[in-house]
Amino acid sequence: MQNPHGSSELAELGEIRFQPWNVGRWILWGALALVFALLPLFFSRGFALTLMSQMGIMIVFALSYGMLLGQTGMLSFGHAVYSGFGAYAAIHAMNRIAAGTLLWPISLLPLVGGLAGAFFGVVFGYLTTRRAGTPFAMITLGIGEMVFAAALMFPGFFGGEGGVTGNRTAGPPFMGLPWLSWLTFGPQVQVYGLIAVWCFVCIVAMYALTQTPLGRIANAVRDNPERAEFIGYNTQRVRWLVLILSSFFAGIAGGLTAINFEIVGAESFHAVRSGGVLLAAFIGGAAFFFGPILGAVVFVVFAIALSDYTKAWQLYLGVFFVLLVLYAPGGLASLLLMNLRVAKFRKFARLRDPYVGVLLGGLLLALGVVLLIELTYHVTLDIGQGPLMRLFGLPLDTSAPGPWVLAAFVLVSGFVAFDYYRRRFARCWHDVQVEIEDWIRENPGDSPR
Amino acid sequence: MLSDTLSQLLYGLSYGLLLFMLASGLTLIFSMMGVLNFAHASFYMLGAYAAYQVSQWIGFWPALVIAPLLLFAFGAVVERWGLRRVHKWGHVPELLFTFGLSYIIVELVQVIWGRAAVAYRVPAELDGPVAWLQGYGITFPQYRMFMMGVAVAMLVAIWLLLTRTRVGLVIQAALTHPQQVEALGHNLPRVYMGVFGGGAALAGLAGVVGGNAFVTEPAMAGTVGAIVFVVIVVGGLGSLLGAFIAALLIGLLENFGKASDLTGLAVLARLGVDLDSGSALHSVLALSLSQVAPVLPYLLLVIVLIVRPKGLLGTREG
Amino acid sequence: MILRLMAAGAAAALLAAPPAFAQSKSAAAPQTVKIAYVDPLSGPFAGVGTNLVRHFQFMTEQVNARQLAGPGVRFEIVTFDNKASPQETLTVFKQVVDQGIRYVVQGQGSGAALALIDAIDKHNERNPAQSVVLLNYAAVDPDLTNSKCSFWHFRFDANTDMKMEAMTTFMKDRPQMKNVYLINQNYSHGHQVSRVAKELLARKRPDVKVVGDDLHPLGQVRDFSPYIAKMRAANADTVITGNWGPDLALLVRAARDAGLNANFYTYYAGVIGTPTAIGAAGEDRMLQVSYWHPNIAPEYPYEKLYLDFKKRFNEEWYAVATYTGLAMLGEAMRRTGSADPLKVAYAMEGMKMDAPHGTIEMRASDHQLLQPLWIASWTKVGGANRHDIEKTGYTWKTEAAYPTFVASQPTSCQMKKPARPQ
């Protein structure tokens, strides 16, 4: 149960197939496409569209990283190199399209980015995949630092501090069809549409890859490289191939970035970008295919949306990440799947009440922590702005003992409640898991239906 | 000029020894527990800030002792309540735990001490150039000499601790045969806690002496973090002596590199090759060594990892 | 599925509530002009960013208290964190537009400034009824008022070329200067400083030799001693550097440690945190070019502002461009009686005003503010040099004061101007 690798859980979950047609698959993918299509109807403000566009890009980027980390077990600290090169290739192509020297549709610009990413995947990948494990991680770190330093030093290609700007509306009309000339990709909603289409296609493509022999052997290389060698596969070649494919999709993400922002700078190579995608993939649960999708959405919410409401967003992100590593190293996806397994065994009803208790207690505890952190941040970092601050729309006077007492009270009561319900929940959960494990042991290969 | 070269040598050595102080803790932690501590540079930063605070209240010399002790306690707590829990998931989650920890530490430092640099200064008695070197025409700061002294003393102390004391022997045994050590009745988790705390204390000591020579500010962890990894990888993961040699090597390489105006074009010209200024390689080769010197350690890292992943004196590949 | 969609919608409404709440509240007050502050408030550059927020908030209080923008008009600063990233700046700009804010102030980083100008140009072209004006208080890349100039951008800091003009004018009267060494950070700002230094030295002091031109990676160097050794080997008596932050502090300290007797001419020695980091190391060694410092005269009317700010926030009031920017904006609003960005922009063009450091003029051709510049040296507090900078015991002493016309530079700007409003 507590194995961070997803395969055993998935195996226990078994396959769910509908008869006579496997409509489950169509429903899932169809629902995903529908969500992508309908989101702008509910979230139509400029910032919300931007946020969703960035989520779409991050999903592709995080999934490409999931291919490396989750599927093949390669921990890379320099993945932003490939998306950065993809972005630069796309923005230079965009400028050439606008100048008329290159005939290529803007909507297919991410492909240019993907090819650039793949090219550097071939070049750098050959160097990096000769080693595995920690040496691989360290090499990617070194290459990431070097590329970033180089980007600042060569303003000719990398555009210096201002980066390279482009204009996504300057190309020829979509598909050359005059009746589609309104599709200029100027308005953000059209860019969102383009990103959504690319995101969907990439998700399908990367999922399909996991079902191919290459995808399966990549899993084998992750789990037991020695054995993979013994059955005749060159692990270095496999890792290199996976890296090339992963950098292709990372390049596509970079190309989408170029279209979305119309500016690409040296920050695209920064260690913070590489760290960010690592965080996103891990938060979601890299071992599962859809984990990075979850993680990308959560990460964008933390890093971009949350930073508007609080200065302490980095602290929250760090704490959230550390808690996840401590208690759910399989990421959010593993939490989801563990509960799905319980539901499949029809034992979820027993967990419902403890869950409610744990969640409410946890919410109270989190509220207390947030109150305390925000008050402390205001006092230490916003001095001179006066003691008044607003939290969740309510005014608080940090110089008075009131808010502090409230924060302490909420914190303590939340902690007590959370701890109490946590114990109850842990007992209940343990009982349920023991029952499930027993059933599996007694009925090997069966499905509880 | 000879005095110039000697002066350069001394500067390079002192910088290398500081890197070694940082890297030694990391090597110890890695060889013992197999975890690459990404938060190590943050411990360095905490050490500098702790020393600043203590020196504000008491003075620099007490801070030299108190700050590492505080870091030891902090490291022990982190190991006991954090790392130990993650240990059963494997090495990658341990690494990621320290990664997340480094984010948190940077934020906490900013909350407590603010976002700007703090006035952590070299103590007055150590300020100024070394007198007897002045006679040879070399102006070398006394404080750098002090830093070198602390680093060497630290190396000797660690060596003595590991080879001449009971605790050290237990630690050495636990490096290679942890189960036997546990079977013999030693409290292995406590040994781990002690080693992690010790590594943190070494990083803190580096922070105490380095924080006032270089600027103490919230971004200081990021700038040394990557170089430290280069040092331990090039030296060989798990080897203290390797880390020592690699640190000195990198310190000297960087310093002599910065001092040189050699460019690729000049080398090619010496060989009789003239490169057209329009060609793509031209802008790369026009870079002088002093421009790329700070990035050379990463190049060295990549080359070493490709050619000899064990590093100079490493015992394991990671 | 429907329930979930409704829940999602409710969540979205809740997310949108706080800004909406803030907006509706201020609509009830007398006309409030919101000004967006877009700069890093988290991350490694947050120290400078948060300090500048306080500058703006302080200045906003002055504007509101003295009705500098006209009767009944108030300014309000709304902060946005761009995390020093040009791409994040664009995301944040969308929020600025969403909230209906028409004025933006920005200054930390020419990269972000360039991204913002590009975005504002495109936005104003596609949505002329919601035009936005950018007041740049510190991004000094000369391109912003030359090749990349824009009608909607106004710069209130002297750019790199102007500051170098003042520096080299000062050097013209220093015959003891023979060998100049240039050291800069290896990115566009450093490249610009190096370029313009060589250009202007060749013009004004052809007898001076440039004995070194070093570029080092940004923020990566801890130990500057090898560069100091090179300076000594080249017999440099003057060093010109555009470095800022730890790169500057460590450079100056390394020079002091090695006993190098050269004068360091800097751009950014006064930025928050750097005086603390340099301290005594800069004595008899360091100079800076700036448009203001607290000891520019034995007594001057804005000294009270400086002291007030220092007492309240325990930080230095040094970015006076925050004052001139908002003061000029307010004056333009007062003269036109309107807060419409197009009218205000045209009113600011060519405007002349009084400021803490003298008479300033916003040049119409490129929207670069022309202002007097000072060359000041770092010296112990005493006599006329009375204000202690960041409790270091040191302060700035005027070495030369240059009126506006000295540092003004010609411009290559060909900005496209929109139709003048009636």
Image (spheres, rainbow, N blue to C red):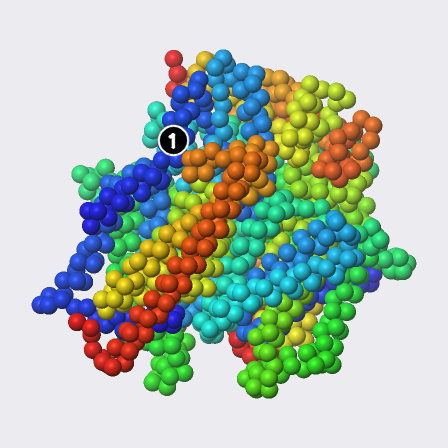
User: In the picture provided, is A365 more to the left or to the right than A177?
Assistant: right
User: In the picture provided, is C190 more to the left or to the right than A269?
Assistant: right
Looking at the rendered structure, the kind of residue marked 1 is Phe
Vertical placement of residue C88 versus B257, above or below: above
Q: Quadrant of the N terminus of chain A?
A: bottom left
Provide the chain ID for the residue under circle 1.
C
Front-most of residues C15 and A277: C15
Q: In which quarter of the image is the C terminus of chain A?
A: bottom left
Vertical placement of residue C215 versus B34, above or below: above
Instruction: Name which quarter of the figure residue C301 lies in.
Output: top right
Where residue A125 sits: x, y (%)? 43, 68
Vertical placement of residue B202 versus C272, above or below: below
Identify the residue at horizontal 26%, vertical 78% (top origin): A440
Where residue C414 sits: x, y (%)? 47, 28
Identify the residue at horizontal 75%, vertical 59% (top origin): B64
Instruction: Name which quarter of the figure residue A182 lies in.
Output: top left
> Which element type, helix, strand or loop, lies under badge 1?
helix
Instruction: Check disc 1: other Cα within 10 Å, few if <14, some if 14-19, many if 20+.
Output: few
Where residue C327 sits: x, y (%)? 56, 21
- Which residue matches tag 1? C21
Identify the residue at horizontal 40%, vertical 22% (top origin): C27
Whether residue A52 appears in this view of the structure is: yes
Whether residue C374 appears in this view of the structure is: no
Front-most of residues C362 and A308: A308
Front-most of residues A403 and B59: A403
